[in-house]
């Protein structure tokens, strides 16, 4: 029998415990109430946790920082104060996958104070909870006991409630994020870059990344076998420090998207919403979305050379030939690599053209034809050399009326010592964006740090590489990109922003490396123009190969690169995808649909079309028996009238696909 006295004591303790605990965590929920976050300190250590629809997503996950030569921001905290805010707006990006973006969240700002270790020292954590996930960041108030300081380690944890399957790339051993995404359980990932994409047992899709990476190091994540917890690992400087905190007193936002399916995850705009509004006046004047061609694939196919000589690609005459073709086919720009001294030594001048390249004449010619000359600054990763010349190099372009520059950082380390994703790299890339903005130049940045949504603030950062692109189909000795790669990217690297993947190769045999070729059908190449989002979208092949295939090429010439709306009628990561986009300011829709390794019949529900209207569908699809590995070339082009009630059933081969233009005709 229970002793009455003990029973009363136990009851009192339980009630007290419940009351104490219930009073302690500080909660904030999303505007629709589906996502909730709790903050708490336990023995002075700050933690947060996240639930969706009452189900745990993140269990208690630690927050904090290890500092250099100062007590850590890791324990001994108590909550000094909290502030709450709610935000609801709709904003219009200069360009994008949609023309307006909702930004609705509830915010909780927790001010923490240390007691004994560093008496009175303050740290704040700001949480924003959206209907489709969360973001949070650290604030480091400048204070007597904390002026400039050095972060040696960020202690942020993400303690998942289960071990989801993930798609990730390793953080080390690959250059510039040009790796294939691996499908692995969370606890066996090792150390990975972000974004990391996850799928839970119940089909919930999630993605961990960061937003607004400013004067900080990029975040990687470390997994531990047998544990569902990931820990932040910042990219270090060569000297081992992670971040020198001076004027910028906030960390980037750590972001977690939580969605019902892959399509909804890819439509989350948390990353963009956690960046600052546009800082460039009248950016739309020069940050203009374009289809572009390039004196480019010829280098990778070795039919021309970057260096001057008999087979020099960047001659005035050859560029004019590309400009003529661009003008005839409705392309807005031509990229020219190999125009400057000295590709023979990679000791680059950004102001001295080769003698057979006339920059002023080409700009004059391009303007006459309505085709922009897109410049190129390959730095070889030599930052000091570039920063010495950057102002003059960009001025040369601006003085010639140019609006675009492709930048590049081929080289294992920047200045032979720092990683691209270190704070050193982050600082340099920002300097380039700001200098370019000053000269009204838009950027296509290759070998970048992983994008984090800065294009909201700087729309001149129009596209970036940081992806294993089509060029791997030219020279990767292990063979080209596998069929699943391009139907994985929209849900992995694509979550970080536009990709300069450079699709639309039309000739798949590779004279340089016969074992390496494009592992898709030709119809899938067309589909990729829609599927792989980039406002500066390249058709990468040599123009002769387009001239030989005018029928399929027509789709590319018609397809815009700026959109009012994007939807995903069907998708499964790595297996298949259908993306539909409505052209900005117009009535037409463009659809790209593709498979991975397996042939399948796509079932494309056109319910996104305006009800009560008829559309003329021009369909470019795999010809009969077209498969990437047997017969990749046949494309069937057919037309039919459709409405929002139509469900198109379209057979697609292995690594096949279809591209569809839907032109609005009239009300039914
Ligand atoms: C690598 C880039 O990805 C590619 O586009 C460029 O042609 C070469 N570097 C040379 O700059």
Image (tube, rainbow, N blue to C red):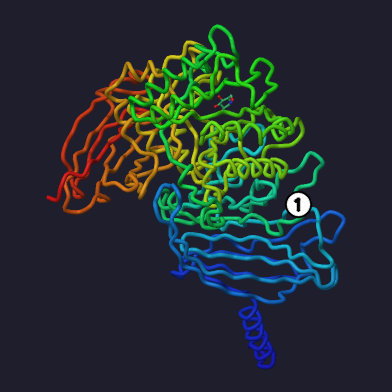
In the image, residue 6 sits, relative to residue 285, either above or below, namely below
Residue at image location 52% in from the left, 12% down from the top? 304
Res. 599 in view: no
Q: Quadrant of residue 13?
A: bottom right
**Which residue sits furthest left?**
668
| Quadrant of the image containing the N terminus | bottom right
Tell me the crowding category of disc 1: few under 14, some 14 to 19, or many 20 or more residues within 10 angstroms, Cα based. Answer: many
Q: Position of residue 64 (x, y in %)?
A: 73, 60
Q: Position of residue 128 (x, y in %)?
A: 56, 65
Camera-nearest residue between 132 and 552: 552
Q: In this rendering, would 401 be left or right of 580?
A: right
Q: Position of residue 185 (x, y in %)?
A: 55, 44
Q: Tell me the residue that label 1 is attached to.
A: 153
Residue at image location 61% in from the left, 79% down from the top? 22
In the image, residue 25 sits, relative to residue 355, either above or below, namely below
Q: In this rendering, would 658 be left or right of 205?
A: left
């Amino acid at each position: 029998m229970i002793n009455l006295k003990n029973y009363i004591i136990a009851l009192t303790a339980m009630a007290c415990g419940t009351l104490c605990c219930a009073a302690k965590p500080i909660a904030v929920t999303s505007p629709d109430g589906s996502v909730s976050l709790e903050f708490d300190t336990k023995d002075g250590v700050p933690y947060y946790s996240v639930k969706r629809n009452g189900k745990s997503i993140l269990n208690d996950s630690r927050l904090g920082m290890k500092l250099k030569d100062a007590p850590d921001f890791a324990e001994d905290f108590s909550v000094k104060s909290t502030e709450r805010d709610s935000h609801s707006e709709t904003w219009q990006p200069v360009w994008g996958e949609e023309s307006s973006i909702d930004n609705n969240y509830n915010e909780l700002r927790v001010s923490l104070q240390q007691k004994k270790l560093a008496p009175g020292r303050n740290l704040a954590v700001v949480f924003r909870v959206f209907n489709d996930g969360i973001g949070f960041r650290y604030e480091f108030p400048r204070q007597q006991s904390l002026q400039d300081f050095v972060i040696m380690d960020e202690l942020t944890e993400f303690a998942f409630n289960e071990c989801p399957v993930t798609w990730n790339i390793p953080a080390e051993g690959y250059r510039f994020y040009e790796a294939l995404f691996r499908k692995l359980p969370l606890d066996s990932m090792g150390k990975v870059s972000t974004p990391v994409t996850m799928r839970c047992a119940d089909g919930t899709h999630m993605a961990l990344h960061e937003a607004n990476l400013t004067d900080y190091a990029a975040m990687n994540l470390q997994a531990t076998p047998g544990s569902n917890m990931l820990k932040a690992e910042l990219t270090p400087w060569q000297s081992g420090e992670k971040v020198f905190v001076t004027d910028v007193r906030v960390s980037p936002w750590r972001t977690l998207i939580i969605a019902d399916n892959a399509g909804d995850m890819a439509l989350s705009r948390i990353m963009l919403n956690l960046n600052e509004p546009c800082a460039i006046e009248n950016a739309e004047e020069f940050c203009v979305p374009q289809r572009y061609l390039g004196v480019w694939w010829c280098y990778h196919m070795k039919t021309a050379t970057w260096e001057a000589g008999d087979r020099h690609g960047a001659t005035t005459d050859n560029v004019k030939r590309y400009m003529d073709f661009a003008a005839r086919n409705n392309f807005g720009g031509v990229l020219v690599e190999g125009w400057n001294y000295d590709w023979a030594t990679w000791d680059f001048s950004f102001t001295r053209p080769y003698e057979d390249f006339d920059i002023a004449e080409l700009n004059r010619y391009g303007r006459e034809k309505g085709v922009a000359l897109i410049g190129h600054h390959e730095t070889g990763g030599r930052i000091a050399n570039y920063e010495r010349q950057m102002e003059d190099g960009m001025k040369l372009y601006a003085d010639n009326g140019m609006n675009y520059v492709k930048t590049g950082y081929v080289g294992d380390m920047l200045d032979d010592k720092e990683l691209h994703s270190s704070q050193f790299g982050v600082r340099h890339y920002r300097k380039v964006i700001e200098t370019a903005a000053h000269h009204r130049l838009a950027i296509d940045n290759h070998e970048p740090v992983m994008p984090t949504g800065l294009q909201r603030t700087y729309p001149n950062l129009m596209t970036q590489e940081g992806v294993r692109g089509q060029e791997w189909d030219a020279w990767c000795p292990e063979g080209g990109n596998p069929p699943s790669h391009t139907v994985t990217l929209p849900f992995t690297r694509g979550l970080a922003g536009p990709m300069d993947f450079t699709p639309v190769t039309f000739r798949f045999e590779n004279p340089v490396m016969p074992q390496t070729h494009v592992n898709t059908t030709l119809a899938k190449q067309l589909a990729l123009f829609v599927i792989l989002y980039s406002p500066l979208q390249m058709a990468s092949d040599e123009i002769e190969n387009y001239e030989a295939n005018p029928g399929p090429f027509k789709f590319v010439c018609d397809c815009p690169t700026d959109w009012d709306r994007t939807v995903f009628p069907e998708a499964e990561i790595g297996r298949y995808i259908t993306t539909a986009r409505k052209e900005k300011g117009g009535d037409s829709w463009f659809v790209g649909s593709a498979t991975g390794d397996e042939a399948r019949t796509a079932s494309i529900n056109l319910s996104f079309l305006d009800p009560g209207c008829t559309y003329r569908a021009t369909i470019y699809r795999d010809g009969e028996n077209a498969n990437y590995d047997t017969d990749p070339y046949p494309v069937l082009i057919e037309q039919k009238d459709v409405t929002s009630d139509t469900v198109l059933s379209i057979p697609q081969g292995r690594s096949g696909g279809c591209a569809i233009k839907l032109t609005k005709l009239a009300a039914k």
